[in-house]
Image (cartoon, rainbow, N blue to C red):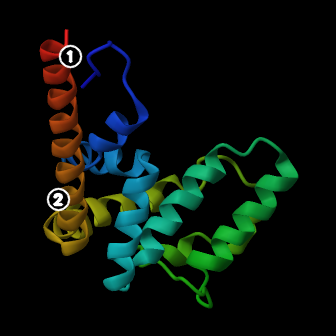
Amino acid sequence: TEHHDGNPSSSQQTLKGTSRWTTSLENLLEDPEGVKRFREFLKKEFSEENVLFWLACEEFKKTQDKKQMQEKAKEIYMTFLSSKASCQVNVEGQSRLNETILGEPHPLMFQKLQDQIFNLMKYDSYSRFLKSDIFLKHKRAEEQEENSSEAQTIAKRASRIYNT
C-alpha cells in the first residue's frame, strides 16, 4: 500500500504489520515489531527461548570474525543447548552437538537445530499467536489507526474541494 503521492511512508509500513505477519512466520520474524509481540506471547507460554535461539542463530550466521564466531558459538551453546543452559531449547539430538565442535565454528553449525526450532514455532506457537489476545489487540489498534488516518485524509480532501 502506497500513499497518494506514491511514497510508501513508515507509518504505512507498520500498518501492514499484522496482515504481513499472518502470511508467514518468516514475515513475522523479519519485522522487529512482530518479533517483539511474538516474544511477548512466547513469554506467556514459557517458550520465549525458541525465538531467542532462532534470533541468536540468525545473528551468528552474519558473524565474519573467527574469534567472535567462537565466542558467539560458545554463548549460544551455553545459553540454549548445554544441559546446564539457562534458556534450554528442546531439540532432538542435542547431545550430538558436543562442545568439541565449538573450537571450529562455522556459520551454519546451528542450522539443523535452528530449523527444528523454526518448525516447532511455525507449526505450534505461530498459529496460537495469531489467535492470541496480544496479536488481536495489536491488529485492532492498527486498524483503528488506519481508519483514523483514512478519515483525516478524506476530511482534508473534502476541505480542499470545498475551500477553493
| Type of amino acid at the residue the image marks with label 2 | Arg
Going 17% across and 50% down the picture, which residue do you hit?
A: 143
Q: Position of residue 72 (x, y in %)?
A: 73, 62
Tell me if mark 2 has few (under 14), some (14-19) or many (20+) residues whose alpha carbon lies within 10 angstroms of its own: few
Residue found farthest to the bottom: 84
Q: Give the label on residue 160, or none.
A: 1
Q: Residue at x 46, y 59 (%)?
A: 114
Element carrying mark 1: helix
Sequence order check: which comes first, mark 2 or mark 1? 2
Q: Residues within 10 Å of mark 1 (few under 14, many from 20)?
A: few
Residue found 30% across the figure and 59% down from its top: 119
Which residue occupies the foreground of this view, 37 or 70? 37
Mark 2 — residue?
Answer: 140
Q: Given the current orientation, which residue lies at the most extreme top position?
A: 164
Say whether residue 115 is visible.
no
**Residue 50 appears at what percent x and percent y?**
43, 71
In screen coordinates, is 99 left or right of 83? right
Residue 123, compared with residue 30, is above or below; it is: below
In the picture, measured across the screen, residue 102 lies left or right of residue 91, that is right
In the picture as drawn, the residue positioned furthest to the front comes out as: 163
* The image quarter in which residue 116 lies: bottom left
